[in-house]
Image: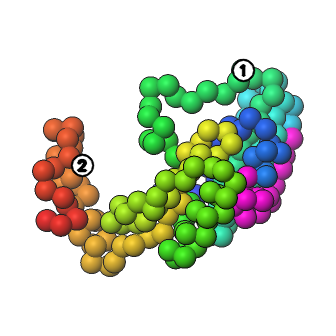
């Protein structure tokens, strides 16, 4: 297959203007595309919506749909809040700390930085209830080689036991 990268990931939002204020004005993403339609292009079904796209530095997008005639959005009640999230990348710890300060200054609770060994991350929720992660990569070439070598064995072990190994793979 010729998959080259992420074009966009799309979520639902409660209000397109409020979502734009968060992603453009607070996080600094560019509102690049806004398309309003009354019918779903792929199916032709009636569903007035706006689809807004925020451009990331690598050319990919974070996109949102506002669906005013659909029932109110709800999060998956059977999945913990920490599982479903959008992780965006920054290049340095200084940028991570700056975003943390900027988001926290608005009154939004920010967790972290959390050291995941492969990255340092902060966490917070957008105005739609979507969990956000902002991360700075902390891997080394040797670490990535080791993780890549262990990916298949870790997956195989997990599929048999449904538990993490007793030994931390980052220090084995």
As drawn, 26 above or below 58: above
* Secondary structure type for disc 1: loop
Residue hosting label 2: 155
As drawn, 125 above or below 172: above
Callout 2: few (<14), some (14-19), or many (20+) C-alpha neighbours within 10 Å? few
Callout 1: few (<14), some (14-19), or many (20+) C-alpha neighbours within 10 Å? few
Q: Residue at x 24, y 49 (%)?
A: 155
The furthest residue to the top: 71
Mark 2 / mark 1, whichever is N-terminal: 1
Which region is colored magenta?
22-36
- Here the colouring is rainbow
Q: Is residue 31 magenta?
A: yes
* Secondary structure type for disc 2: helix
Relative to 149, 62 lies left or right: right
Q: Name the front one of labels 2 and 1.
A: 1
Relative to 30, 56 lies left or right: left
- The disc placed on residue 92 is none
Residue 6 picture location, percent across and down = 58, 58
Q: Residue at x 48, y 69 (%)?
A: 136
As drawn, 24 above or below 65: below
Residue hosting label 1: 71
Q: Residue at x 48, y 37 (%)?
A: 81
Q: Depth check: 148 or 80 in front?
A: 80
Quarter of the rendering occupied by the C terminus: bottom left
């Amino acid at each position: 297959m010729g998959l080259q990268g992420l074009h966009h990931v799309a979520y639902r939002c409660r209000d397109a203007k409020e979502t734009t204020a968060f992603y453009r004005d607070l996080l600094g993403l560019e509102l690049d595309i806004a398309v309003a339609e009354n019918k779903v292009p792929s199916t032709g079904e009636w569903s007035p919506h706006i689809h807004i796209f925020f451009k990331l530095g690598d050319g990919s997008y974070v996109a949102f749909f506002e669906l005013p005639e659909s029932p109110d959005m709800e999060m998956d009640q059977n999945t913990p809040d920490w599982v479903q999230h959008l992780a965006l990348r920054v290049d340095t710890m200084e940028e991570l700390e700056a975003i943390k300060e900027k988001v926290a200054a608005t009154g939004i609770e920010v967790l972290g930085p959390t050291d995941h060994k492969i990255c340092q991350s902060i966490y917070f929720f957008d105005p739609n209830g979507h969990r956000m992660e902002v991360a700075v990569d902390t891997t080394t070439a040797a670490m990535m080689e080791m993780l890549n070598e262990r990916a298949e064995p870790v997956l195989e072990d997990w599929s048999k036991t449904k538990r993490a190994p007793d030994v931390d793979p980052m220090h084995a």
